[in-house]
Image (cartoon, helix red, strand yellow):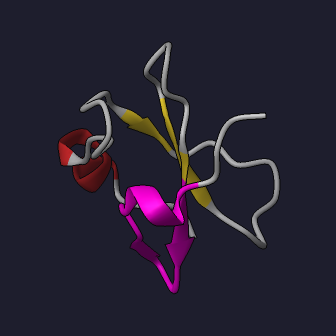
Amino acid sequence: MPLEAGLLEILACPACHAALDDRTADEATPELICTGADCGLAYPVRDGIPVLLVDEARRPA
């Protein structure tokens, strides 16, 4: 389930404060990806709720 556009406009990466993108390769595990050039953390979305905790984020490959 994609997040509302209005919500995506106000969310930011807690680590670097860059915008987040809801692109995801697998809808079974939705993520918000940081668009920051040096960051790129992927934050999980569980039950439609973004988990914006750096400790829960997946590091870029």
Residue 59 lies in the magenta-colored region: no
Query: Residue at the location (49% across, 27% down)?
Result: 39
Residue at the outermost front position: 55
Residue 44 location (% of width, % of height): 56, 65
In the image, which residues are magenta?
Answer: 43-57
Name the foreground residue: 41 vs 25: 41
Residue 7 x, y percent position in the rendering: 25, 55
Image height check: is 10 above or below 57?
above
Name the residue at 55% across, 30% down. Answer: 40
On screen, residue 59 versus residue 14, left or right, reads: right
- Residue at the far top: name it: 37
* Quadrant of the image containing the C terminus: top right
Q: Position of residue 16 (x, y in %)?
A: 30, 30
In the rendered image, the vertical position of residue 61 relative to residue 55, given as above or below:
above
Q: Quadrant of residue 31?
A: bottom right
Classify 37 as above or below 28.
above
Asked if the magenta segment contains residue 44, the reply would be yes
The residue that appears at 41% across and 55% down in the rendered structure is: 54
Q: Is residue 9 left or right of residue 21?
A: left
